[in-house]
Amino acid sequence: MDIKQASYLGSWQRNDQMPHTEKPEFAFIGRSNVGKSSLINMLTQHKGLAKTSSTPGKTQSLNLFVLNNIIQFCDLPGYGYAKVGKSTRQAFSKMIDFYLKERPNLFCLFILVDLRLEPQKIDIEFINTCGENGIPFAIIGTKADKIKVAEVEASTQRYYDKLAETWEQLPPFFISSSEEKTGKEEIWAFIQSALNNQ
């Protein structure tokens, strides 16, 4: 999809405060500092659309963007960041849970995982919870440019093996690098397919 127009609509602390629309929405989530904002900027071809930061836990609200006035992206707060207080983590958890279960126009959730790391328990648990709750999702392995090609393949296989312990049919899995624009075409093809099948 050629993104000719991309704009920031705003940030909200609760799903019921967000503007409700029939535009298909695709959300992005993952552990803090996994590269959600960078990926959104890469996919939309607008470098400064989503605010990026080297400080984990920067995204603390539901950030909404509209593309070509046709679809929307939502940048969700990262999970698993230990340096925020317990009450803040609980608030993030409630915010995310309510959004995922109650957002009527959510088409797909992209769960981002860092390919440089072994499959993290918190990521696997979140993926399994989404499956149990019937939330449509796909997985995106980020930071592929930070490791060698063979390591990317090995890391991806580790995720396949881990997910195969609980999944009969594995969810879609994409490899990405925001720096090198890896995975851009594949992810957009997936989004377009989802839109065509609505």
Image: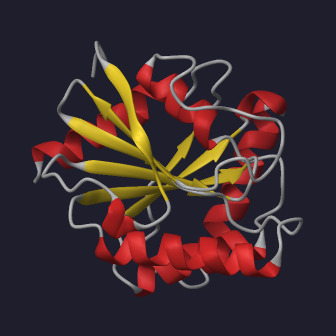
Instruction: Judge whether 132 appears above or below 196 on screen.
Output: below
Name the image quarter holding residue 133: bottom left
Viewer-closest of 61 and 43:
61
User: Residue 91 location in percent, x, y?
Assistant: 62, 76
User: Residue 14 location in percent, x, y?
Assistant: 44, 67
Residue 176 visible, this orientation: no
Instruction: Judge whether 28 appears above or below 189 on screen.
Output: below
Q: Residue at x 55, y 55 (%)?
A: 61
Q: Residue at x 84, y 42 (%)?
A: 55
Residue 127 visible, this orientation: yes
Instruction: Judge whether 109 appears above or below 33 on screen.
Output: below
Viewer-closest of 138 and 19:
19
118 sits to left or right of 101: right
76 sits to left or right of 148: left
Viewer-closest of 60 and 102:
60
User: Residue 163 location in percent, x, y?
Assistant: 60, 73
Which residue, as the protein is rendered here, is positioned at the far top?
4
145 sits to left or right of 165: right
Q: How is the image coloured?
A: secondary structure
Instruction: Judge whether 132 appears above or below 40 on screen.
Output: below
Q: Residue at x 51, y 70 (%)?
A: 96
Q: The C terminus appears in which quarter of the rendering?
A: bottom left
Counting every numbered tag in the picture gives: 0
Q: The N terminus appears in which quarter of the rendering?
A: top left
User: Residue 60 location in percent, x, y?
Assistant: 63, 55
